[in-house]
Image (cartoon, rainbow, N blue to C red):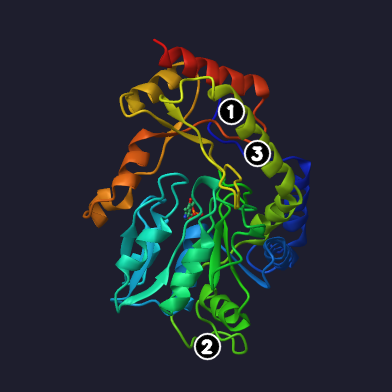
């Protein structure tokens, strides 16, 4: 079976974990946490990193630190992983959905302004499948309407917009280090911000709202959203190889593109990289023509030993959030398939995936 995604690790991760365990610092104090926070924030060009237990916790922490509360509205793309919308709901606020851009699938900046009301407090652009959002118009809209921006960069570590890393544009920006993300700590996440005050607020909220100068004194209701030193130990080793991982993912995407462009253009749409973008191809995802039954195709690929995933269902199509019509996201979601995307895929495996795809398509 060619797997959809495997973590890219070696002895270095193991050695760091052994070191963390031997140090006795296995919970959320320990040198690896600060090191990982500082190095990952530095990699993204941001001043402060606040490591969390997962990416969902990072998003929730960010929204809480910005004061998002009951009856506020937060603008999110409908085509995203469910966390983006759920964390808005956790605050008692309402996610307001925006359709996708037809070419690169992230939220369409032209469709944001029509969603803004007097209750709107923030926009969460999601850099979907490794491709960045068009940040200039989004930041401009946010400025014009006095809205916070929280980037959801869970799928796009190292992706760039006009040469600048994603995760460095918004007021607070969030990453996930789940096992299938660009780099991983098993479970894990991080908030980045240049604002020292917001950083301090997040550190307190992450630690049960405990006053940093008065043990067991809680000024606010916080959470236990801390990362462990063992996870951070893995993160430090992963960060050493992040550029290698991205390079491999980009080479794999290039090879997929090269092989798949031989299949009739009307049958498959390949992922893009806009002029202003560095795509990290988190999941190499294609669209198949609407005349092809996507789910049948996935079943046949599975029978041939190839693991795939459908693209996300638009959030507005699922029970907790039903309502609205977002034609681009609905079409992209129905036609989309993610192909095996591990950094260490062999070229022969990519060839096999494309051969099988080609054969099924020409049946
Ligand atoms: C993975 C992901 C998250 C959540 O991360 P977890 O670490 O799984 O909680 C949030 N947003 C997007 C877009 C994601 O892909």
| Residue 123 drawn at (x, y percent) | 42, 67
Give the vertical position of 40 relative to 289 (above or below): below
| Residue 114 drawn at (x, y percent) | 31, 66
Res 6 visible: yes
Q: Which of marks 1 and 2 is in front?
A: 1
Marks 1 and 2, Cα distance to the nearest angstrom? 56 Å
Within 8 Å: ligand 1 and the Cβ of disc 3? no
- Horizontal side of 297 relative to 56 (left or right) equals left
Q: Residue 256 carries which label?
A: 1
| Residue 244 drawn at (x, y percent) | 74, 43
| Nearer to me, 320 or 23 | 320
Give the vertical position of 109 relative to 290 (above or below): below
| Nearer to me, 351 or 7 | 351
Res 58 visible: no
Residue 299: quadrant of the picture:
top left
- Horizontal side of 137 relative to 214 (left or right) equals left
Q: Does label 2 or label 3 sit earlier along the sequence?
A: 2
| Residue 199 drawn at (x, y percent) | 59, 77
Which secondary structure, mark 1?
A: helix
Which secondary structure, mark 3?
A: helix
Q: Does label 1 or label 2 sit earlier along the sequence?
A: 2
Q: Which mark is residue 347?
A: none
| Residues at marks 1 and 3 touching, judged by CB atoms closer than 8 Å | no
Q: Residue 217 carries which label?
A: 2
According to the picture, the residue beneath numbered tag 3 turns out to be 250
Could you tell me which residue is drawn at 47 percent across and 65 percent down?
Answer: 138
Q: Which residue lies furthest to the top in this view?
A: 363
| Residues at marks 1 and 2 touching, judged by CB atoms closer than 8 Å | no
Residue 287: quadrant of the picture:
top left
Q: Does label 1 or label 3 sit earlier along the sequence?
A: 3
Q: Which of marks 2 and 3 is in front?
A: 3
Which secondary structure, mark 2?
A: loop
């Amino acid at each position: 079976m060619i797997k959809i995604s495997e973590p890219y690790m070696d002895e270095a991760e193991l050695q760091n974990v052994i070191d963390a365990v031997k140090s006795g610092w296995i919970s959320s104090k320990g040198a690896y946490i600060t090191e990982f926070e500082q190095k990952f924030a530095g990699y993204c060009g941001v001043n402060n990193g606040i490591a969390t237990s997962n990416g969902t916790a990072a998003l929730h922490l960010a929204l809480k630190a910005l004061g998002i509360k009951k009856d506020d509205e937060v603008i999110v793309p409908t085509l995203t992983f469910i966390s983006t919308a759920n964390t808005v709901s956790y605050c008692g606020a309402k996610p307001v959905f925006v359709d996708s851009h037809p070419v690169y699938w992230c939220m369409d900046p032209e469709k944001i302004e029509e969603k803004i009301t007097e209750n709107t407090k923030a926009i969460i652009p999601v850099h979907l499948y490794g491709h960045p959002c068009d940040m200039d118009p989004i930041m401009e809209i946010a400025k014009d309407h006095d809205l916070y921006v929280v980037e959801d960069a869970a799928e796009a570590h190292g992706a760039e917009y006009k040469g600048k890393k994603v995760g460095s544009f918004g007021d607070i920006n969030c990453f996930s280090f789940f096992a299938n993300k660009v780099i991983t700590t098993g479970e894990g996440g991080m908030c980045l911000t240049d604002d020292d005050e917001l950083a301090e607020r997040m550190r307190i909220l992450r630690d049960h709202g405990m006053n940093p100068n008065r043990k067991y004194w809680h000024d606010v209701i916080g959470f236990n959203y801390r990362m462990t030193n063992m996870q951070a130990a893995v993160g430090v080793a992963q960060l050493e190889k992040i550029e290698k991982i991205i390079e491999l993912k980009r080479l794999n995407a290039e090879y997929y593109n090269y092989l798949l462009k031989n299949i009739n253009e009307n049958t498959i749409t390949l992922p893009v990289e806009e002029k202003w973008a560095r795509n990290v191809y988190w999941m190499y995802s294609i669209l198949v023509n609407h005349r092809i039954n996507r789910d049948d195709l996935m079943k046949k690929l599975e029978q041939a030993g190839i693991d795939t995933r459908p693209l996300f269902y638009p959030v507005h199509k699922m029970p907790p959030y039903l309502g609205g019509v977002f034609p681009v996201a609905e079409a992209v979601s129905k036609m989309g398939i993610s192909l095996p995307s591990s950094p260490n895929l062999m070229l022969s495996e990519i060839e096999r995936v494309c051969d099988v795809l080609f054969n099924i398509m020409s049946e």
